[in-house]
Amino acid sequence: MTQYGVELWSRDGVRICEITHLVQNLYWVEERNEAEVLQFSMDLDAFERYMIENVGADPVSNFREGQTEIKVKERRGDGPWVYLFGTQLYWAPINLNNDGSATIAVTAQGYLNFFNSRYPDPSLVYTDEESVEIARDLIRQNQAVTNGDYGIILPSGDYYTTSKLRDRTFEQYTSTTKLNIQRLTALVDGTFDFKFLADKTFMTYAALGSPRSDFRVAFDRANYRSTITSAILNRGANNLYNLIHGIGSGFGADQLITHQSDATSQLEFKVRELPVQFNEVSNTDTLAENAQARLQRVKQLLRMPQLTLSGADLPDVRLEVGDIIPVVMTGRHLLEDLTGYYRVERMETHVDENHFLQAVTPYFQKTGEYVA
């Protein structure tokens, strides 16, 4: 059995208390190169009594939006507790109900979103700089500003780099630090992944996750055999484009524009155009890199299984964002078309009232054909 716990922490890294016994409707979303989103509810009266009587802490100053941090931890069987990720309290409306009860509806966001309201210094110029080092320096520069240090840790020892050198400059207040870091990860000729650990360490990887030889999802329509709880098998041409018009900085005749196309997709589906704004990009090569990265994501038909897996469906080793798993659909031709290896891009986790794993819904990106 997999159990989860929730703790309050100060933004300075001091544990305040455990609130697992107060938490209801625990749910979170993890996504590759994106901030986690954590949601749950608590009874207002029970929370205040616990903070005052048991913890001896002021419930206002220790549960403050934009300051208090909330960490999620996991324990498998009788094993040790392991922190999964950390967040900062973002939104906590209080619902007053007709029966006299009051409920706090909590939403917290992962540490990447610290940089969703921060911007690169337009005076920064990177020439022949490695991609990961640009991302790290954007964090470093943001934290060097007076009152701008969030406590993000940049490892000084071994960490993953792409060895891909790039040039970068930034237009003033046109794209956030978060967006610029994300765009660096998606460039076709040197992708990488990153993750903020629960202690705020910024980690980089060639790719999050790993191929899972211990786990396979299977559904046989003809014989009604399944290792999943439910599924939606998405198929469509929505979001299918094979000619990207990347629009950069400038106006009129001085505006940067690049056109990136995929001949194979155009032959199969005819031309489908999509203009995309990259207002902050003032370099032609950079604009082409960003437009090409968008093209790679949208040039194919949508063939994506959306599965719901119960706790009993999941392997003993935790399913991680970035893991590659085989999905085998048989018994109908339209189902078999979706068989293949899939990478987990996003994962939603639901926890039951006893704080045990209830269900996981992974969202995928296809990575290859399945070989039995």
Image (cartoon, rainbow, N blue to C red):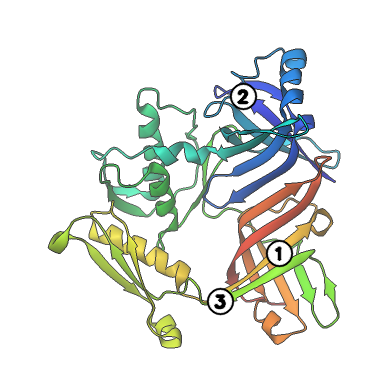
- Amino acid found under the numbered disc labelled 1: Leu
Which mark's residue is nearer the viewer, 1 or 3? Answer: 3
Comes first in the chain, label 2 or label 1: 2
Depth check: give the residue in front, 130 or 318: 318
Residue matched to label 3: 236
> Decide: marks 1, 3 in contact (CB < 8 A)?
no
Q: Where does the image place residue 344, in percent across and percent down from the top left?
A: 62, 59
215 to the left or right of 61: right
Residue visible at 79% across and 35% down in the picture: 80
Is 284 situated left or right of 223 in this image? left
Q: Is residue 172 above or below residue 251?
A: above
The quadrant in which the C terminus is found is bottom right
Q: Residue 120's quadrant in the figure?
A: top left
Distance from the alpha carbon under mark 3 to that under mark 2: 44 Å
Task: Classify mark 1: helix, strand or loop.
Answer: strand
Of residues 74 and 303, which is closer to you in this image?
303
Q: Nearer the viewer, mark 2 or mark 1?
A: 2
State the image coordinates of residue 237 (x, y, percent, origin top left).
Answer: 51, 77
Q: Which residue is mark 2?
A: 63
Residue on which the image places disc 1? 307
Residue 326 point in image, percent of width and height: 70, 69
Mark 3 / mark 2, whichever is N-terminal: 2
Which amino acid, mark 2? Phe
Q: Can you see residue 173?
A: yes
> Badge 3, how many Cα within 10 Å: few under 14, some, many 20+?
few
Residue 96, placed above or below residue 297: above
Question: In this orientation, which residue lies closer to the viewer: 49 or 183?
Answer: 49
